Image (tube, grey):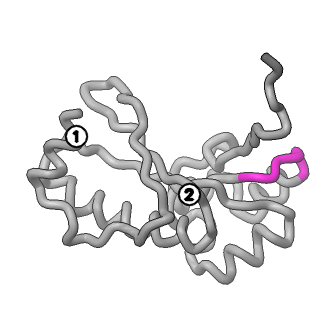
Amino acid sequence: MAVALDRIRVGSAPDSWGVWFPDDPQQVPWQRFLDEVAEAGYSWIELGPYGYLPTDPARLTDEVQSRGLKVSAGTIFCGLHRGPSEWDATWEQVSRVAALTQAMGAATWSSSRRSGGTTRPPRSWSPRSSPPSSGATSPGAWSASAAR
């Protein structure tokens, strides 16, 4: 069976440029990341840590489109394994990233969960529906999700 290579899309992310935080003077500036990822021939990027790239959808659209790029996904960094004290902050972050991802027309959001030093398989959410609201998930639902 022949593989339809024209249907495969390869993108990159800020972490491939050493970006792990929204603002760190030792990291590549976001404009340079966008310039270099486009120069390297990529068409798709993910958002990286929230706040690294512009969070205003109109500005981010202008910046990525001027370089021939598109946003494929958003990412959050969280520690759900730390328990209930982490859940509200994580849900707030998920809501911000999901809203920006949806505004950019991206198709997915995913999160790898860490527990005891082991990364669990990613969970995905499609922004084809409304972004999650902070009151939509109870602590019990988070527990059930984290246990899966």
Q: Which mark is residue 68?
A: none
Seen at 70% across and 44% down, the residue is 12
Q: Secondary structure at mark 2?
A: loop
Q: Which residue is mark 1?
A: 146
Count of numbered circles on the image: 2
Q: Quadrant of residue 63?
A: bottom right
**Residue drawn at the location 86% of the way across and 65% of the way down:** 67
Main SS of the magenta segment?
loop
Amino acid bearing label 2: Asp
In the image, residue 43 lies in the stretch drawn in magenta: yes
> Which residue in the structure is indicated by mark 2?
24
Whether 140 is drawn above or below 95: the answer is above
Quadrant in which the C terminus appears: top left
Residues rendered magenta in the picture: 39-44
Q: Secondary structure at mark 1?
A: helix
- Residue 25 versus residue 133: which sits nearer the camera? 133
Dividing the picture into quarters, in which one does residue 123 lie? Answer: top left
Q: Position of residue 73 (x, y in %)?
A: 58, 54
Distance from the alpha carbon under mark 2 to that under mark 1? 30 Å
Pinpoint residue 34: horizontal percent, then vertical percent: 77, 59
